[in-house]
Amino acid sequence: MTSSPAYFAPLHDLMCTRTPSRERDVQGGERMTVSDADAAFILGKGGKTKEKIARVAQVKLDLSERNQEAVIEIKGTDKNRARARKYIKCVMAQRVGPVHVDPEDDQDDDLTIIPVPTECIGFVTGKSGNFLRQMEEEWGTLMFFAEYRGRSENEARGGTEKLAIFGTRRAQRGAELKVMSAVEQKIPGHYTRGMDCSIPNLHDVDAAGCTDEWGTDTLRLRDDELSYALGRQGMTRRKLAKSSGCIVEYVGHVVHLSGTRSQRLRARQYLKWLFMQLEGPVNSTTPLAQTARSSRCRPTASATSWARGARPSARSRRSGAR
């Protein structure tokens, strides 16, 4: 990151003093001097904005006053400090106008930009920005609507705004799918109409086609299948995600499984077990269970019990309550 990044609108000049380091990504510190107005904006209500920046960048941030100037002290690795500076400048830019982003100039792999239809912006943002803040809290991301350079006139007239999502690869994908799910509720088929799913049907959810070390698998469900896989208030979806370690999100009728190959394989297996329960009990002689035992993505005992529909004993329920 340079002192004048190419993809941000002109911002206030920042005085920056760095602690020298011998090699990249060793722990170090640096200070940024900002205006009082910017300092208040970076701090946020109850210090939440500062905490969010620190969490997403994985640094320690301290805001203080020295020689009647507001000073931000950043502690962390070179890479994480550079990201913290970028996020701080994003927040400062929001105070005076839109943030201008050019994804092609961002080489940190910490940014995803998703187009959101203008009629869904209020729905995605939520009252007083609550829904956006909830997604940031859930996934550990920094999210805001931004303008970006190189935008064509056709795109400008396309009725969409660009939502920038900063965070880890997993956090970016989780928040992106959550946004897509919300938009799909408002405009059915916006993202999924005509989508070619990587999993043809429920009978083909095994390892076929699951080759990328990191990626997303998709499967289209019928109305009754979606209701069953979602569960009451989304409980079944959350159990699938927690037990497999995979991101599981329903965008309209298309289930998205995102994560590493082993995580996606587990999610596929648990999803198939889930629907096999409609036809009868799942046991150790089921071919899929045998595949799970012979692969590296072996399910945990709790996940296997859940997939079989086993009920915990009274003793285990008391233990869980504790």
Image: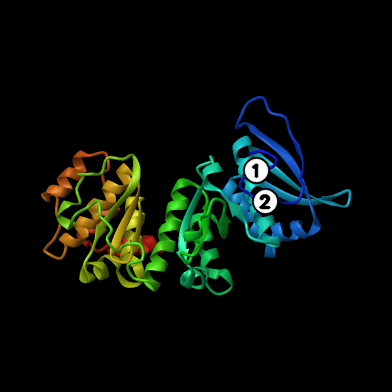
Expressed as whole percent of the image width and height from the top left, the position of residue 249 reads 35, 60
Question: Within the image, what quadrant is residue 146 found in?
Answer: bottom right
Q: Residue furthest front?
A: 153
Question: Label 1: few (<14), some or many (≥20) within 10 Å?
Answer: some
The number of callouts visible is 2
Labelled disc at residue 319: none
Residue 140 in percent (x, y) is at 52, 54
Left or right: residue 288 versus residue 259 is: left
Farthest right residue in view: 67
Q: Measuring from the top left, give residue 197's x and y in whole percent.
A: 25, 55
What label sits on residue 5 in the rendered view?
Answer: 1
SS at mark 1? Answer: loop
The answer to whether any part of residue 128 appears in the image is: yes
Point out the image quarter for the N terminus.
Answer: top right
Q: Residue at x 75, y 51 (%)?
A: 12
Separation of marks 1 and 2 at Cα, in angstroms: 10 Å
Q: Amino acid at mark 1?
A: Pro
Which residue is labeled 2 in the image? 89
How crowded pointer 2 is (Cα within 10 Å; few <14, some 14-19, many 20+) is rated as many
Residue at x 26%, y 67% (from the top left corner): 226
Compare residues 244 and 172 and report the one nearer the observer.
Answer: 172
Outermost residue toward the bottom in this view: 127
Query: Nearer the viewer's eye, disc 1 or disc 2?
Result: 1
Q: Secondary structure at mark 2?
A: helix
Give the amino acid type for the residue marked by disc 2 in the picture.
Answer: Lys
